[in-house]
Amino acid sequence: MATVILARHGRTTANATGVLAGRGKGVHLDELGLAQARSAGERLAGLPLAAVVTSPLERCRETAREINALQPAPLKVATERGLLECDYGSWTGRELKSLAKEKLWQTVQAHPANARFPEGESMAQMMARSVAAVRHWDARLEEQHGPDAVWLAVSHGDVIKSILADALGMHLDLFQRIVADPGSLSVIRYTALRPFVVSVNSHAGDLSVLKVKKRRRRRGDSDAVVGGGAGGRTA
């Protein structure tokens, strides 16, 4: 199948002040966040994307706009509610240092599969709908553009961590071991047999290496290379 680049939005005013923004409106990129989004765009400038898809929230739309502006041929940005931030319910807008005193905080840290936010959604629900959204878009874009299509999904930290955990075959209870910083890029290449996690939480490097010549699907495209292979994607 196709390859998805997962971009976490750049830093926001809420990130900088230790506030859980959640789905609250009016949370925008700060100066550093804009610079992080532009840096991500520069890394992708040599890689024509098949689609740019984003969470509807402002911070993700702003990040997608900065990245898309540096594309060889900017695309119409699509929004996808499946990439929306976790619904933290009544935790939304509160300071993290205050939330760390709540009993639920320890569940979120140690057993997130059992965590449901008051008046919000569970982390298991977040994982299920975000993974379903990415896999849906991936299959759709492969059908439209072929198995070498590369596309961008702009989302949020916990959402990206859950998508990576699914690709790694990890239980949700282990997803807190994954890091997805503001402005970072992670890459997953899906195949019929398994996803391949190409990179996680990267901040530097030209990603045009993901660009390959159009080719027919080959038998064994889902196979892992015994011994590790030569690295990179080749035609």
Image (cartoon, rainbow, N blue to C red):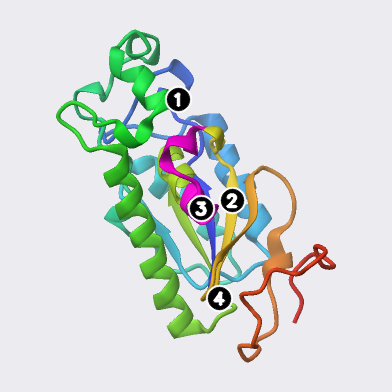
In-front residue for pair 28/98:
98
The residue positioned 34% from the left and 32% from the top of the image is 27
- Badge 3 element: loop
Residue 15 tag number: 1
How far, Cα to Cα, is label 3 from label 1? Answer: 29 Å
Is 27 contained in the magenta span?
A: no
Which three-letter amino acid code belongs to the residue tagged 3? Gly
Q: Nearer the viewer, residue 117 or 170?
A: 170
Q: Which residue is mark 4?
A: 149
Q: Position of residue 132 (x, y in %)?
A: 34, 61
Query: Is 91 left, or right, of 36 in this rendering?
Result: left
**Quadrant of the image for the C terminus?**
bottom right
| Quadrant hosting residue 227 | bottom right
Residue 117 percent across, percent down from the top left: 23, 29
Instruction: State which tag comes first along the sequence, 1 or 2.
Output: 1
Residue range highlighted in magenta: 164-176
Q: Position of residue 44 (x, y in %)?
A: 64, 59
Marks 1 and 2 close (CB-CB < 8 Å): no
Quick check: marks 1 and 4 in contact, CB under 8 Å? no
Q: Nearer the viewer, mark 1 or mark 2?
A: 2
Mark 3 Cα within 10 Å, few/some/many (few <14, many 20+)?
A: few
228 relative position to 18: left or right: right
- The rendered magenta stretch, by its main secondary structure, is classed as helix
Q: Quick check: is 166 in the magenta stretch?
A: yes
